[in-house]
Image (cartoon, coloured by chain):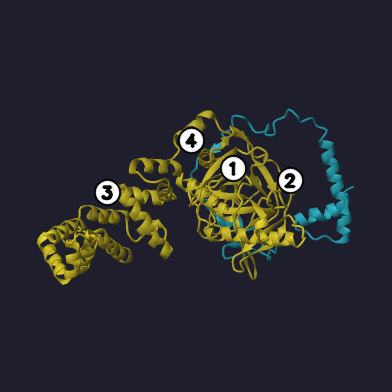
Amino acid sequence: MSTIEKYESVIGLEIHAQLLTVSKMFCRCPNRFGSLPNTQICPICTAQPGALPVINKKAVELGVRAAIALNCQTHLESIFARKNYYYPDLPKGYQITQYEQPFCTKGEVFVRFKNGDEKRIGITRIHFEEDAGKSNHESYGTLVNLNRSGVPLIEIVSEPDMRTAHEAGQYLRTIRGILRYADICDGNMEEGNFRCDANISVRLKGTEKFGTRVELKNINSFRFVEKAIEYEVQRQVLAVEDGEKIIQQTRSWNSAKNITEVMREKENAHDYRYFPEPDLPSLVISVEWLDKIRAEMPELPKQAAERFKKSFELSDYDAAVLTSSKEMAQYFEKVVAESKNGKSSANWVMNELLGRLNAVGKEIESSPVTAGQLSELIVKIDSGQISGKIAKTVFEEMFATGKDASSIITEKGFVQISDPAALENAIRKVIESHPSQTAEYRAGKIKLLGFFVGQVMKETQGQANPALLNELVKKLLDQ
Amino acid sequence: MLNREEVLKIAKLARLTLTEEEIGFYQKQLTRVLGHIQDLNQVPTGTTAFVQHIPSDAEPFRKDDAEPFPSPLDLMKNAPSVENNSFLLPTIVEHS
Protein backbone atom coordinates (compact mmCIF):
# COMPACT_ATOMS: atom_id res chain seq x y z
CA MET A 1 0.00 0.00 0.00
CA SER A 2 1.46 3.37 -0.96
CA THR A 3 1.67 6.13 1.61
CA ILE A 4 -1.28 8.03 0.20
CA GLU A 5 -3.49 4.95 0.22
CA LYS A 6 -3.08 4.61 3.99
CA TYR A 7 -4.98 7.84 4.40
CA GLU A 8 -8.46 8.94 3.62
CA SER A 9 -9.56 12.49 3.01
CA VAL A 10 -12.60 14.08 4.58
CA ILE A 11 -14.11 16.79 2.42
CA GLY A 12 -16.99 19.16 2.95
CA LEU A 13 -17.99 21.90 0.52
CA GLU A 14 -19.39 25.35 1.04
CA ILE A 15 -21.11 26.50 -2.12
CA HIS A 16 -22.05 30.11 -2.71
CA ALA A 17 -24.74 30.51 -5.32
CA GLN A 18 -25.95 33.91 -6.53
CA LEU A 19 -29.71 33.97 -6.83
CA LEU A 20 -31.38 34.77 -10.15
CA THR A 21 -33.21 37.88 -9.01
CA VAL A 22 -33.65 41.09 -10.94
CA SER A 23 -32.47 43.26 -8.04
CA LYS A 24 -30.07 42.94 -5.11
CA MET A 25 -30.82 41.35 -1.74
CA PHE A 26 -31.53 44.49 0.25
CA CYS A 27 -31.82 47.30 -2.31
CA ARG A 28 -33.26 47.96 -5.77
CA CYS A 29 -29.95 48.05 -7.63
CA PRO A 30 -29.94 45.70 -10.64
CA ASN A 31 -28.40 42.29 -10.07
CA ARG A 32 -26.55 42.01 -13.35
CA PHE A 33 -23.08 40.79 -14.23
CA GLY A 34 -20.63 42.58 -16.48
CA SER A 35 -21.79 46.22 -16.28
CA LEU A 36 -19.34 49.09 -16.01
CA PRO A 37 -17.77 49.28 -12.53
CA ASN A 38 -19.84 51.04 -9.88
CA THR A 39 -22.86 51.73 -12.07
CA GLN A 40 -25.11 49.44 -10.02
CA ILE A 41 -24.63 50.98 -6.61
CA CYS A 42 -26.84 52.99 -4.30
CA PRO A 43 -26.71 54.38 -0.75
CA ILE A 44 -27.71 50.99 0.71
CA CYS A 45 -25.13 48.73 -0.94
CA THR A 46 -22.37 51.30 -0.46
CA ALA A 47 -23.23 51.70 3.24
CA GLN A 48 -24.10 55.39 3.32
CA PRO A 49 -25.08 56.56 6.80
CA GLY A 50 -28.72 55.96 7.63
CA ALA A 51 -29.45 53.61 4.75
CA LEU A 52 -31.55 50.59 5.72
CA PRO A 53 -31.89 47.15 4.09
CA VAL A 54 -35.22 45.63 3.01
CA ILE A 55 -35.41 41.94 2.12
CA ASN A 56 -36.04 40.94 -1.51
CA LYS A 57 -39.02 38.59 -1.51
CA LYS A 58 -37.99 36.78 -4.67
CA ALA A 59 -34.58 36.00 -3.16
CA VAL A 60 -36.34 34.31 -0.25
CA GLU A 61 -38.50 32.32 -2.66
CA LEU A 62 -35.48 31.12 -4.62
CA GLY A 63 -33.71 30.13 -1.41
CA VAL A 64 -36.74 28.16 -0.25
CA ARG A 65 -36.92 26.55 -3.67
CA ALA A 66 -33.31 25.40 -3.18
CA ALA A 67 -34.24 24.08 0.26
CA ILE A 68 -37.06 22.03 -1.23
CA ALA A 69 -34.91 20.80 -4.11
CA LEU A 70 -32.21 19.65 -1.68
CA ASN A 71 -34.70 17.90 0.60
CA CYS A 72 -34.04 20.27 3.50
CA GLN A 73 -36.14 21.39 6.41
CA THR A 74 -37.32 24.96 5.88
CA HIS A 75 -37.70 26.95 9.09
CA LEU A 76 -40.64 29.29 9.22
CA GLU A 77 -38.66 31.74 11.31
CA SER A 78 -34.99 32.55 10.95
CA ILE A 79 -32.82 35.56 11.70
CA PHE A 80 -30.16 37.56 9.94
CA ALA A 81 -26.80 38.26 11.57
CA ARG A 82 -23.87 40.56 11.08
CA LYS A 83 -20.52 38.99 10.31
CA ASN A 84 -17.90 41.61 11.05
CA TYR A 85 -14.63 41.84 9.18
CA TYR A 86 -12.60 44.51 7.47
CA TYR A 87 -12.03 44.41 3.80
CA PRO A 88 -12.30 47.25 1.28
CA ASP A 89 -14.91 45.47 -0.84
CA LEU A 90 -17.20 45.18 2.19
CA PRO A 91 -18.34 48.77 2.66
CA LYS A 92 -20.39 48.30 5.82
CA GLY A 93 -17.56 46.53 7.63
CA TYR A 94 -19.94 43.62 8.09
CA GLN A 95 -21.76 41.20 5.87
CA ILE A 96 -25.44 40.52 6.45
CA THR A 97 -25.74 36.76 6.66
CA GLN A 98 -27.49 34.12 8.74
CA TYR A 99 -25.63 32.46 11.57
CA GLU A 100 -27.40 31.02 14.58
CA GLN A 101 -30.79 30.40 13.03
CA PRO A 102 -30.51 29.79 9.27
CA PHE A 103 -33.70 29.41 7.24
CA CYS A 104 -32.87 25.87 6.29
CA THR A 105 -31.12 22.83 7.75
CA LYS A 106 -30.73 19.06 7.38
CA GLY A 107 -31.01 18.14 3.75
CA GLU A 108 -29.50 15.59 1.45
CA VAL A 109 -28.65 15.00 -2.14
CA PHE A 110 -27.86 11.80 -4.00
CA VAL A 111 -24.86 11.91 -6.26
CA ARG A 112 -24.66 9.47 -9.14
CA PHE A 113 -21.42 8.12 -10.57
CA LYS A 114 -20.61 6.75 -14.02
CA ASN A 115 -20.49 3.15 -12.79
CA GLY A 116 -24.09 3.47 -11.62
CA ASP A 117 -23.26 3.91 -7.91
CA GLU A 118 -25.09 6.49 -5.89
CA LYS A 119 -23.93 8.22 -2.72
CA ARG A 120 -25.86 10.29 -0.23
CA ILE A 121 -24.26 13.60 0.74
CA GLY A 122 -25.78 15.38 3.71
CA ILE A 123 -26.53 19.10 3.62
CA THR A 124 -25.90 20.75 6.97
CA ARG A 125 -27.62 24.03 6.25
CA ILE A 126 -28.47 26.65 3.69
CA HIS A 127 -28.51 30.30 4.64
CA PHE A 128 -29.04 33.65 2.98
CA GLU A 129 -26.36 36.27 2.72
CA GLU A 130 -25.25 39.19 0.60
CA ASP A 131 -22.26 39.15 -1.69
CA ALA A 132 -19.31 41.50 -1.20
CA GLY A 133 -17.93 43.82 -3.88
CA LYS A 134 -15.02 42.86 -6.08
CA SER A 135 -11.39 43.86 -5.62
CA ASN A 136 -9.04 43.89 -8.55
CA HIS A 137 -5.41 44.05 -7.57
CA GLU A 138 -3.33 46.14 -9.96
CA SER A 139 0.33 47.12 -9.77
CA TYR A 140 -0.58 50.68 -8.71
CA GLY A 141 -3.23 49.74 -6.16
CA THR A 142 -6.46 47.91 -5.57
CA LEU A 143 -9.58 48.81 -7.57
CA VAL A 144 -12.88 48.20 -5.83
CA ASN A 145 -16.09 47.71 -7.79
CA LEU A 146 -19.24 47.54 -5.67
CA ASN A 147 -21.66 46.35 -8.38
CA ARG A 148 -21.66 42.94 -6.73
CA SER A 149 -22.04 44.32 -3.22
CA GLY A 150 -25.41 43.16 -1.91
CA VAL A 151 -26.15 40.58 -4.59
CA PRO A 152 -28.26 37.82 -3.00
CA LEU A 153 -26.56 34.53 -2.26
CA ILE A 154 -27.37 31.26 -0.67
CA GLU A 155 -24.56 29.37 0.99
CA ILE A 156 -25.03 25.61 0.89
CA VAL A 157 -22.92 23.86 3.51
CA SER A 158 -22.45 20.11 3.11
CA GLU A 159 -21.65 17.56 5.75
CA PRO A 160 -18.05 16.31 5.58
CA ASP A 161 -19.35 13.29 3.68
CA MET A 162 -17.05 13.23 0.68
CA ARG A 163 -14.00 10.99 0.67
CA THR A 164 -12.37 11.72 -2.66
CA ALA A 165 -11.83 14.70 -4.93
CA HIS A 166 -13.98 12.99 -7.54
CA GLU A 167 -16.90 12.65 -5.12
CA ALA A 168 -16.58 16.35 -4.32
CA GLY A 169 -16.55 17.18 -8.02
CA GLN A 170 -19.65 15.09 -8.69
CA TYR A 171 -21.44 16.61 -5.70
CA LEU A 172 -20.67 20.09 -6.99
CA ARG A 173 -21.93 19.18 -10.47
CA THR A 174 -25.10 17.69 -9.01
CA ILE A 175 -25.86 20.79 -6.95
CA ARG A 176 -25.16 22.99 -9.94
CA GLY A 177 -27.48 20.90 -12.10
CA ILE A 178 -30.29 21.17 -9.57
CA LEU A 179 -29.89 24.93 -9.05
CA ARG A 180 -29.80 25.57 -12.77
CA TYR A 181 -32.73 23.27 -13.41
CA ALA A 182 -34.89 25.05 -10.86
CA ASP A 183 -33.86 28.52 -12.14
CA ILE A 184 -32.26 29.37 -8.81
CA CYS A 185 -28.75 30.16 -10.01
CA ASP A 186 -26.90 30.40 -13.32
CA GLY A 187 -24.16 28.09 -12.09
CA ASN A 188 -21.42 29.88 -13.98
CA MET A 189 -18.15 29.44 -12.07
CA GLU A 190 -16.14 31.54 -14.49
CA GLU A 191 -18.42 34.53 -13.98
CA GLY A 192 -18.34 33.87 -10.25
CA ASN A 193 -22.07 33.38 -9.69
CA PHE A 194 -21.42 29.85 -8.42
CA ARG A 195 -18.41 29.45 -6.15
CA CYS A 196 -17.04 26.79 -3.93
CA ASP A 197 -14.74 26.53 -0.92
CA ALA A 198 -13.60 23.14 0.27
CA ASN A 199 -12.83 22.06 3.82
CA ILE A 200 -10.28 19.31 3.65
CA SER A 201 -8.60 17.14 6.24
CA VAL A 202 -6.89 13.78 6.16
CA ARG A 203 -6.80 10.88 8.60
CA LEU A 204 -5.45 7.35 8.66
CA LYS A 205 -8.01 4.95 7.24
CA GLY A 206 -9.98 3.26 9.97
CA THR A 207 -9.62 6.13 12.46
CA GLU A 208 -12.62 8.08 13.63
CA LYS A 209 -11.17 11.42 14.61
CA PHE A 210 -11.04 14.14 11.96
CA GLY A 211 -7.70 15.73 11.19
CA THR A 212 -7.18 19.50 11.36
CA ARG A 213 -9.01 21.02 8.45
CA VAL A 214 -7.79 23.47 5.90
CA GLU A 215 -10.16 25.70 3.99
CA LEU A 216 -9.41 25.89 0.31
CA LYS A 217 -10.62 28.99 -1.52
CA ASN A 218 -10.46 30.44 -4.98
CA ILE A 219 -11.44 27.35 -6.90
CA ASN A 220 -12.99 29.34 -9.70
CA SER A 221 -13.43 26.79 -12.42
CA PHE A 222 -14.90 23.32 -12.65
CA ARG A 223 -11.66 22.10 -14.13
CA PHE A 224 -9.79 23.04 -10.96
CA VAL A 225 -12.07 21.58 -8.31
CA GLU A 226 -10.80 18.04 -8.37
CA LYS A 227 -7.23 19.03 -9.13
CA ALA A 228 -7.07 21.51 -6.27
CA ILE A 229 -8.55 19.09 -3.74
CA GLU A 230 -6.27 16.28 -4.88
CA TYR A 231 -3.24 18.50 -4.50
CA GLU A 232 -4.27 19.63 -1.03
CA VAL A 233 -4.93 16.06 0.15
CA GLN A 234 -1.53 14.99 -1.06
CA ARG A 235 0.14 17.96 0.58
CA GLN A 236 -1.48 17.15 3.91
CA VAL A 237 -0.62 13.45 3.75
CA LEU A 238 3.02 14.24 3.02
CA ALA A 239 3.11 16.78 5.84
CA VAL A 240 1.59 14.33 8.33
CA GLU A 241 3.99 11.61 7.21
CA ASP A 242 6.86 14.03 7.82
CA GLY A 243 5.63 14.50 11.35
CA GLU A 244 4.39 18.05 10.71
CA LYS A 245 1.32 19.40 12.39
CA ILE A 246 -1.42 20.59 10.01
CA ILE A 247 -2.26 24.19 10.83
CA GLN A 248 -5.85 25.34 10.59
CA GLN A 249 -5.61 27.90 7.83
CA THR A 250 -7.13 29.22 4.65
CA ARG A 251 -5.29 28.31 1.49
CA SER A 252 -5.85 29.45 -2.04
CA TRP A 253 -5.58 27.51 -5.27
CA ASN A 254 -2.99 28.94 -7.63
CA SER A 255 -4.06 27.69 -11.06
CA ALA A 256 -0.90 28.94 -12.75
CA LYS A 257 1.40 26.96 -10.49
CA ASN A 258 -1.05 24.10 -9.77
CA ILE A 259 -0.48 24.36 -6.03
CA THR A 260 -2.32 25.61 -2.95
CA GLU A 261 -0.82 28.53 -1.05
CA VAL A 262 -1.37 29.96 2.40
CA MET A 263 -3.80 32.88 2.34
CA ARG A 264 -4.23 33.50 6.02
CA GLU A 265 -4.68 31.80 9.32
CA LYS A 266 -8.29 30.85 9.66
CA GLU A 267 -10.36 33.24 11.69
CA ASN A 268 -12.42 31.55 14.33
CA ALA A 269 -16.13 32.19 14.37
CA HIS A 270 -15.80 34.46 17.40
CA ASP A 271 -13.34 36.65 15.51
CA TYR A 272 -16.26 37.66 13.31
CA ARG A 273 -18.26 38.85 16.32
CA TYR A 274 -21.54 37.62 14.91
CA PHE A 275 -24.62 39.22 16.35
CA PRO A 276 -28.27 39.47 15.26
CA GLU A 277 -28.81 42.11 12.56
CA PRO A 278 -30.73 44.90 14.30
CA ASP A 279 -31.79 46.53 11.01
CA LEU A 280 -33.90 43.57 9.89
CA PRO A 281 -36.88 41.79 11.40
CA SER A 282 -36.87 38.00 11.70
CA LEU A 283 -37.39 36.27 8.38
CA VAL A 284 -40.87 34.82 8.69
CA ILE A 285 -42.10 32.42 6.03
CA SER A 286 -45.77 31.59 6.37
CA VAL A 287 -47.06 28.07 5.81
CA GLU A 288 -49.21 29.37 2.93
CA TRP A 289 -46.21 30.96 1.28
CA LEU A 290 -44.16 27.79 1.70
CA ASP A 291 -46.98 25.74 0.16
CA LYS A 292 -47.20 28.13 -2.74
CA ILE A 293 -43.46 27.90 -3.42
CA ARG A 294 -43.72 24.13 -3.24
CA ALA A 295 -46.64 24.08 -5.65
CA GLU A 296 -44.78 26.26 -8.13
CA MET A 297 -41.58 24.21 -8.07
CA PRO A 298 -40.20 23.62 -11.54
CA GLU A 299 -39.36 20.05 -12.53
CA LEU A 300 -36.08 18.82 -11.05
CA PRO A 301 -33.47 16.66 -12.82
CA LYS A 302 -34.50 13.55 -10.92
CA GLN A 303 -38.15 13.97 -11.87
CA ALA A 304 -37.24 14.71 -15.48
CA ALA A 305 -35.09 11.56 -15.54
CA GLU A 306 -37.99 9.45 -14.25
CA ARG A 307 -40.28 10.93 -16.88
CA PHE A 308 -37.75 10.26 -19.67
CA LYS A 309 -37.28 6.68 -18.48
CA LYS A 310 -40.99 6.02 -18.61
CA SER A 311 -41.93 7.91 -21.76
CA PHE A 312 -38.98 6.94 -23.92
CA GLU A 313 -37.90 3.63 -22.38
CA LEU A 314 -34.42 4.82 -21.51
CA SER A 315 -31.95 3.26 -19.09
CA ASP A 316 -31.11 4.90 -15.74
CA TYR A 317 -27.80 6.04 -17.08
CA ASP A 318 -29.18 7.47 -20.35
CA ALA A 319 -31.87 9.32 -18.44
CA ALA A 320 -29.30 10.73 -16.01
CA VAL A 321 -27.05 11.98 -18.80
CA LEU A 322 -29.93 13.55 -20.72
CA THR A 323 -31.08 15.43 -17.62
CA SER A 324 -27.62 16.52 -16.48
CA SER A 325 -28.57 20.06 -17.48
CA LYS A 326 -31.76 21.79 -18.35
CA GLU A 327 -30.44 22.74 -21.77
CA MET A 328 -29.58 19.12 -22.48
CA ALA A 329 -33.03 17.94 -21.44
CA GLN A 330 -34.73 20.63 -23.50
CA TYR A 331 -32.63 19.78 -26.54
CA PHE A 332 -33.45 16.10 -26.21
CA GLU A 333 -37.15 16.76 -25.75
CA LYS A 334 -37.24 18.88 -28.89
CA VAL A 335 -35.50 16.13 -30.88
CA VAL A 336 -37.93 13.49 -29.61
CA ALA A 337 -40.98 15.66 -30.19
CA GLU A 338 -40.22 15.78 -33.90
CA SER A 339 -38.47 12.49 -34.50
CA LYS A 340 -40.99 10.44 -32.45
CA ASN A 341 -38.19 7.99 -31.73
CA GLY A 342 -36.98 8.17 -28.11
CA LYS A 343 -34.30 5.50 -28.15
CA SER A 344 -32.77 6.66 -31.40
CA SER A 345 -32.91 10.32 -30.32
CA ALA A 346 -31.16 9.42 -27.06
CA ASN A 347 -28.46 7.53 -28.94
CA TRP A 348 -27.84 10.32 -31.39
CA VAL A 349 -27.69 12.99 -28.72
CA MET A 350 -25.49 10.98 -26.37
CA ASN A 351 -23.15 9.17 -28.72
CA GLU A 352 -22.77 11.37 -31.75
CA LEU A 353 -23.62 14.87 -30.59
CA LEU A 354 -22.14 14.89 -27.07
CA GLY A 355 -19.01 13.12 -28.24
CA ARG A 356 -18.38 15.76 -30.84
CA LEU A 357 -19.33 18.66 -28.55
CA ASN A 358 -16.88 17.37 -25.94
CA ALA A 359 -14.18 17.08 -28.53
CA VAL A 360 -14.50 20.74 -29.50
CA GLY A 361 -15.20 21.93 -25.94
CA LYS A 362 -18.71 23.21 -26.60
CA GLU A 363 -21.86 23.05 -24.52
CA ILE A 364 -25.13 21.85 -25.97
CA GLU A 365 -26.47 25.43 -25.96
CA SER A 366 -23.99 26.30 -28.68
CA SER A 367 -24.32 23.11 -30.68
CA PRO A 368 -23.87 23.75 -34.42
CA VAL A 369 -26.59 21.16 -35.05
CA THR A 370 -29.96 22.32 -33.75
CA ALA A 371 -32.50 19.97 -32.21
CA GLY A 372 -34.73 20.47 -35.28
CA GLN A 373 -31.91 19.52 -37.62
CA LEU A 374 -31.04 16.39 -35.66
CA SER A 375 -34.65 15.22 -35.57
CA GLU A 376 -34.89 15.72 -39.35
CA LEU A 377 -31.89 13.42 -39.74
CA ILE A 378 -33.47 10.77 -37.53
CA VAL A 379 -36.71 10.94 -39.48
CA LYS A 380 -34.76 10.36 -42.68
CA ILE A 381 -33.18 7.23 -41.22
CA ASP A 382 -36.46 5.91 -39.86
CA SER A 383 -38.23 6.45 -43.19
CA GLY A 384 -35.49 4.56 -44.99
CA GLN A 385 -34.34 7.55 -46.99
CA ILE A 386 -30.76 7.11 -45.81
CA SER A 387 -28.97 4.32 -44.00
CA GLY A 388 -27.66 4.67 -40.47
CA LYS A 389 -24.15 4.51 -41.82
CA ILE A 390 -24.66 7.33 -44.31
CA ALA A 391 -26.43 9.28 -41.57
CA LYS A 392 -23.21 9.35 -39.58
CA THR A 393 -21.37 10.89 -42.51
CA VAL A 394 -24.20 13.37 -43.03
CA PHE A 395 -24.14 14.23 -39.33
CA GLU A 396 -20.41 14.88 -39.44
CA GLU A 397 -21.02 17.33 -42.26
CA MET A 398 -23.93 18.94 -40.38
CA PHE A 399 -21.75 19.42 -37.31
CA ALA A 400 -18.95 20.95 -39.35
CA THR A 401 -21.08 23.26 -41.49
CA GLY A 402 -24.35 23.77 -39.63
CA LYS A 403 -26.25 22.80 -42.80
CA ASP A 404 -29.50 20.79 -42.84
CA ALA A 405 -29.42 17.06 -43.49
CA SER A 406 -31.54 17.39 -46.63
CA SER A 407 -29.23 19.87 -48.32
CA ILE A 408 -26.17 17.74 -47.53
CA ILE A 409 -27.92 14.62 -48.84
CA THR A 410 -28.81 16.39 -52.09
CA GLU A 411 -25.39 17.99 -52.49
CA LYS A 412 -23.47 14.79 -51.95
CA GLY A 413 -25.97 12.49 -53.65
CA PHE A 414 -26.31 10.48 -50.43
CA VAL A 415 -29.68 9.04 -51.23
CA GLN A 416 -30.28 5.47 -50.18
CA ILE A 417 -30.59 3.05 -53.08
CA SER A 418 -33.94 1.36 -52.62
CA ASP A 419 -34.47 0.51 -56.25
CA PRO A 420 -34.40 -3.33 -56.51
CA ALA A 421 -33.22 -3.31 -60.13
CA ALA A 422 -30.21 -1.13 -59.35
CA LEU A 423 -29.31 -3.25 -56.33
CA GLU A 424 -29.70 -6.51 -58.22
CA ASN A 425 -27.22 -5.28 -60.82
CA ALA A 426 -24.66 -4.55 -58.15
CA ILE A 427 -25.28 -7.89 -56.45
CA ARG A 428 -24.88 -9.86 -59.67
CA LYS A 429 -21.57 -8.11 -60.28
CA VAL A 430 -20.31 -9.14 -56.85
CA ILE A 431 -21.49 -12.73 -57.26
CA GLU A 432 -19.75 -12.98 -60.61
CA SER A 433 -16.46 -11.67 -59.28
CA HIS A 434 -16.45 -14.03 -56.27
CA PRO A 435 -17.08 -17.50 -57.76
CA SER A 436 -15.40 -19.51 -55.00
CA GLN A 437 -17.34 -17.79 -52.18
CA THR A 438 -20.52 -18.22 -54.20
CA ALA A 439 -19.84 -21.93 -54.51
CA GLU A 440 -19.10 -22.24 -50.82
CA TYR A 441 -22.29 -20.40 -49.92
CA ARG A 442 -24.37 -22.56 -52.18
CA ALA A 443 -22.71 -25.63 -50.64
CA GLY A 444 -24.15 -24.59 -47.28
CA LYS A 445 -21.75 -22.03 -45.75
CA ILE A 446 -24.60 -19.57 -45.30
CA LYS A 447 -22.71 -17.29 -42.93
CA LEU A 448 -20.97 -15.96 -46.06
CA LEU A 449 -24.14 -13.95 -46.64
CA GLY A 450 -22.65 -11.14 -44.58
CA PHE A 451 -19.59 -11.10 -46.81
CA PHE A 452 -21.70 -10.52 -49.92
CA VAL A 453 -23.77 -7.84 -48.25
CA GLY A 454 -20.57 -6.09 -47.19
CA GLN A 455 -19.16 -6.23 -50.72
CA VAL A 456 -22.28 -4.72 -52.23
CA MET A 457 -22.33 -2.00 -49.57
CA LYS A 458 -18.77 -1.19 -50.55
CA GLU A 459 -19.71 -1.18 -54.22
CA THR A 460 -22.59 1.24 -53.56
CA GLN A 461 -20.57 3.39 -51.15
CA GLY A 462 -22.83 2.48 -48.28
CA GLN A 463 -25.93 3.77 -49.98
CA ALA A 464 -27.79 0.50 -50.35
CA ASN A 465 -30.95 0.11 -48.29
CA PRO A 466 -29.72 -2.54 -45.81
CA ALA A 467 -32.99 -4.43 -45.35
CA LEU A 468 -33.68 -4.64 -49.05
CA LEU A 469 -30.07 -5.51 -49.79
CA ASN A 470 -30.13 -8.45 -47.38
CA GLU A 471 -33.26 -9.78 -48.92
CA LEU A 472 -32.01 -9.47 -52.50
CA VAL A 473 -28.56 -10.94 -51.84
CA LYS A 474 -30.19 -13.97 -50.28
CA LYS A 475 -32.62 -14.29 -53.19
CA LEU A 476 -29.95 -14.09 -55.90
CA LEU A 477 -27.54 -16.44 -54.11
CA ASP A 478 -30.26 -18.98 -53.59
CA GLN A 479 -31.19 -19.00 -57.26
CA MET B 1 -7.16 43.91 32.06
CA LEU B 2 -6.85 42.79 28.41
CA ASN B 3 -3.38 41.36 27.83
CA ARG B 4 -0.90 42.36 25.18
CA GLU B 5 -1.58 39.29 22.98
CA GLU B 6 -5.30 39.94 22.95
CA VAL B 7 -4.74 43.52 21.80
CA LEU B 8 -2.37 42.36 19.08
CA LYS B 9 -4.88 39.72 17.92
CA ILE B 10 -7.62 42.33 17.63
CA ALA B 11 -5.25 44.69 15.83
CA LYS B 12 -4.42 41.95 13.38
CA LEU B 13 -8.09 41.27 12.66
CA ALA B 14 -8.57 44.99 12.09
CA ARG B 15 -5.48 45.02 9.86
CA LEU B 16 -3.80 47.61 12.09
CA THR B 17 -0.17 47.92 13.04
CA LEU B 18 0.27 49.32 16.54
CA THR B 19 3.26 51.00 18.14
CA GLU B 20 4.37 49.90 21.61
CA GLU B 21 2.75 53.01 23.01
CA GLU B 22 -0.53 52.28 21.27
CA ILE B 23 -0.57 48.69 22.53
CA GLY B 24 -0.53 49.99 26.11
CA PHE B 25 -3.13 52.63 25.27
CA TYR B 26 -5.56 50.14 23.74
CA GLN B 27 -5.02 47.64 26.55
CA LYS B 28 -6.46 50.24 28.89
CA GLN B 29 -9.09 51.65 26.54
CA LEU B 30 -10.48 48.32 25.35
CA THR B 31 -10.57 47.04 28.92
CA ARG B 32 -12.78 50.01 29.82
CA VAL B 33 -15.05 49.33 26.83
CA LEU B 34 -15.42 45.71 27.89
CA GLY B 35 -16.13 46.85 31.43
CA HIS B 36 -18.99 48.93 30.07
CA ILE B 37 -20.36 45.87 28.23
CA GLN B 38 -20.16 43.96 31.52
CA ASP B 39 -22.38 46.64 33.04
CA LEU B 40 -24.87 46.21 30.19
CA ASN B 41 -24.93 42.48 30.86
CA GLN B 42 -26.79 43.21 34.07
CA VAL B 43 -29.84 44.25 32.07
CA PRO B 44 -32.22 41.26 32.03
CA THR B 45 -32.82 40.44 28.34
CA GLY B 46 -33.78 36.77 28.63
CA THR B 47 -37.36 37.18 27.48
CA THR B 48 -36.80 40.05 25.07
CA ALA B 49 -36.96 39.35 21.34
CA PHE B 50 -33.91 40.82 19.69
CA VAL B 51 -35.89 42.74 17.08
CA GLN B 52 -38.40 44.22 19.46
CA HIS B 53 -37.71 47.73 18.18
CA ILE B 54 -39.03 46.91 14.70
CA PRO B 55 -42.79 47.47 14.45
CA SER B 56 -44.51 44.15 13.83
CA ASP B 57 -46.80 45.54 11.13
CA ALA B 58 -43.89 46.79 9.03
CA GLU B 59 -43.83 45.21 5.56
CA PRO B 60 -40.80 42.94 5.81
CA PHE B 61 -40.27 42.33 2.10
CA ARG B 62 -39.86 44.30 -1.07
CA LYS B 63 -40.82 43.24 -4.55
CA ASP B 64 -37.97 42.12 -6.77
CA ASP B 65 -37.90 45.05 -9.15
CA ALA B 66 -34.78 46.88 -10.12
CA GLU B 67 -34.46 50.61 -10.33
CA PRO B 68 -30.94 51.91 -10.81
CA PHE B 69 -29.92 54.65 -8.42
CA PRO B 70 -29.87 57.84 -10.55
CA SER B 71 -26.48 59.18 -9.53
CA PRO B 72 -24.05 56.40 -8.64
CA LEU B 73 -21.15 58.73 -9.40
CA ASP B 74 -22.18 60.93 -6.47
CA LEU B 75 -21.54 57.98 -4.22
CA MET B 76 -17.91 58.02 -5.25
CA LYS B 77 -17.38 61.68 -4.45
CA ASN B 78 -16.17 60.91 -0.94
CA ALA B 79 -13.58 58.50 -2.22
CA PRO B 80 -10.04 59.84 -1.77
CA SER B 81 -9.08 58.37 -5.11
CA VAL B 82 -10.97 57.04 -8.13
CA GLU B 83 -9.55 55.26 -11.15
CA ASN B 84 -11.37 53.49 -13.98
CA ASN B 85 -14.74 54.15 -12.36
CA SER B 86 -13.47 52.22 -9.33
CA PHE B 87 -12.48 53.12 -5.80
CA LEU B 88 -8.69 53.18 -5.81
CA LEU B 89 -6.99 51.93 -2.67
CA PRO B 90 -3.45 51.28 -1.64
CA THR B 91 -2.49 47.74 -2.63
CA ILE B 92 -4.04 45.18 -0.31
CA VAL B 93 -1.72 42.42 0.71
CA GLU B 94 -3.08 39.43 2.58
CA HIS B 95 -0.94 38.68 5.61
CA SER B 96 -0.71 35.18 6.88
Residue closest to the eye, A259 or A202: A202
First reached walking from the N terminus: tag 4 or tag 2: 2
Which of the labelled discs sits on residue A273, or is there none?
A: 2
In front: mark 4 or mark 2? 4
For the residues beneath circles 3 and 4, the answer to whether they share a chain is: yes
First reached walking from the N terminus: tag 2 or tag 3: 2
First reached walking from the N terminus: tag 1 or tag 2: 1
x%, y% of residue A51?
Answer: 62, 45
Chain seen in yellow: A
Q: In what quadrant of the picture does the N terminus of chain A appear?
A: bottom right
State the residue lying farthest toward the top.
Answer: B47
Mark 4 element type: helix
Tell me the distance, in whole angstroms, between the alpha carbons under discs 1 and 4.
Answer: 23 Å
First reached walking from the N terminus: tag 1 or tag 4: 1
Q: Determine the residue positioned at 20% across, 59% down.
A: A444
Instruction: Judge the density around disc 2: few (<14), some (14-19), many (≥20) Cα neighbours within 10 Å.
Output: few
In front: mark 1 or mark 4? 1
First reached walking from the N terminus: tag 1 or tag 3: 1
Tell me the distance, in whole angstroms, between the alpha carbons under discs 2 and 3.
Answer: 59 Å
Task: Decide if residue B24 is on the left or right side of residue A366.
Answer: right
Disc 1 target residue:
A122
Q: Determine the residue positioned at 54% across, 53% down.
A: A194
Instruction: Judge the density around disc 4: few (<14), some (14-19), many (≥20) Cα neighbours within 10 Å.
Output: some
x%, y% of residue A295?
Answer: 45, 33
Chain seen in cyan: B
Task: Decide if residue A460 is on the left or right side of residue A150.
Answer: left
- Specify the subunit that label 3 lies on: A
Q: Residue type at mark 1?
A: Gly
Residue A284's image quarter? Answer: top right
Which of the labelled discs sits on residue A338, or is there none?
A: 3
Mark 3 element type: helix
Disc 4 target residue:
A293
